[in-house]
Each structure stands twice: as C-alpha cells, then as structure tokens.
Amino acid sequence: VIPPPVIHIESYSEDSISFSLKMTTNVKVSGYVVNIYWTFDTHRQEKRTLIIEGEKSIQKVANLTAHTPYEISAWAKTELGDSPLSFVHVVTSGTRPASPSLKAKAINQTAVECSWTGPRNVVYGVFYATSFLELYRSPHNTTTTSHNITVIVQRDEQYLFLV
C-alpha cells in the first residue's frame, strides 16, 4: 500500500504559501501533482495545478489573496502507481481586499464594456456567463491589470459578470 504524501506548511504571508512534500515510504517517488483550491466570491471555485518532479520538494505559491482560505491537495507519482490524496488547509494572513464595484454597459449587440474600482498593481479576473450554473462551472474569463475591459459576447443573450 502506498501512503499519501505529507504536506507541511512551512510559512505563509498575505500573498504566498510555502509548503514541503515528502513520502514516508521506501517506494521510489518520481514526482507530485498538487492542486491549490480557493473560492472566488462564493460563486466560483478556482484551482491552480503544479506538476513537481522529484522525491522531496519545497514549493512556494505566490500571487495569492490576503485573508483567503486555501486547500492544498497532493498525490505522489511512484513506481507502483499513484498514492492516495493528502489535504491541508491554510488561510493567508492580512486583510482581504474589498470587492471591486463592477459596472457593465452594452456597447452594441456583441460588446460589453466592463469597468470597476479597486486597488492598482493587481491582476483582476473577469468572469462572465449566461447563467449562474455556467458562471460557477465553466465561465468565460480573462485577466487584466487595468480597471476596464471590453468583452465580446454572443448576440441575443443576457450575461452575468463578476470581477
């Protein structure tokens, strides 16, 4: 039986988490697959996947959001197959930024101008879909460092937007 890997949180800050991975077995490990999950605005679960080569590893994940709960899951790739999953939870330090105030205005049948308020020098994600279910499961999305973007949409549809 292959045991799950041990995930140890080494440190965390407002915008990063450092963690180590190791196995408590003599089975040869070729690498790890790590998923970092967080929930955006209670509507959208985000995920970042890391493919890590080697037996032991210390990783730092940056560009995170302050005071946000993150779940880290990992499994090891071994000579005998994949291990079971391990999970850890951590909340980044600091104060969570205020939600941006979004305004969406139709320019024509296929273009919507989105603008919002918020801090400078950060990356914003713009998510849009024709239903709450689609917005949660598989929205269209784009990122930008500015405070406005023009989104191309299908004609004769109503859209929901999040930033």
Image (cartoon, rainbow, N blue to C red):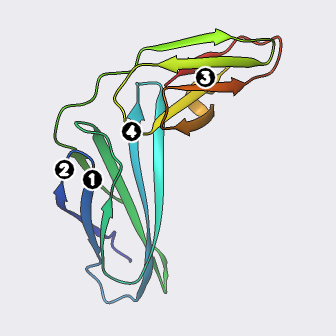
Q: Disc 3 to disc 4, how far (Cα)?
A: 27 Å
Q: Which mark is residue 133?
A: 3
Amino acid, disc 1: Ser
Q: Which residue is mark 4?
A: 122
For mark 4, give the secondary structure.
Answer: loop
For mark 1, give the secondary structure.
Answer: loop
Q: Which mark is residue 13?
A: 2
First reached walking from the N terminus: tag 4 or tag 1: 1
Residue 161, placed above or below residue 139: above
For mark 2, does the 10 Å Cα neighbourhood hold few (<14), some (14 to 19), or many (20 or more) residues? Answer: some
Q: Position of residue 132 (x, y in %)?
A: 59, 18
First reached walking from the N terminus: tag 1 or tag 3: 1
Q: Disc 4 to disc 1, how far (Cα)?
A: 14 Å
Residue 12, placed above or below residue 23: above
Q: Which mark is residue 16?
A: 1
Q: Nearer the viewer, residue 10 or 55?
A: 10
Residue 160, placed above or below residue 118: above
Amino acid, disc 4: Val
Badge 1 vs badge 2, beta-carbon distance below 8 Å? yes
Q: Disc 4 to disc 2, how far (Cα)?
A: 16 Å
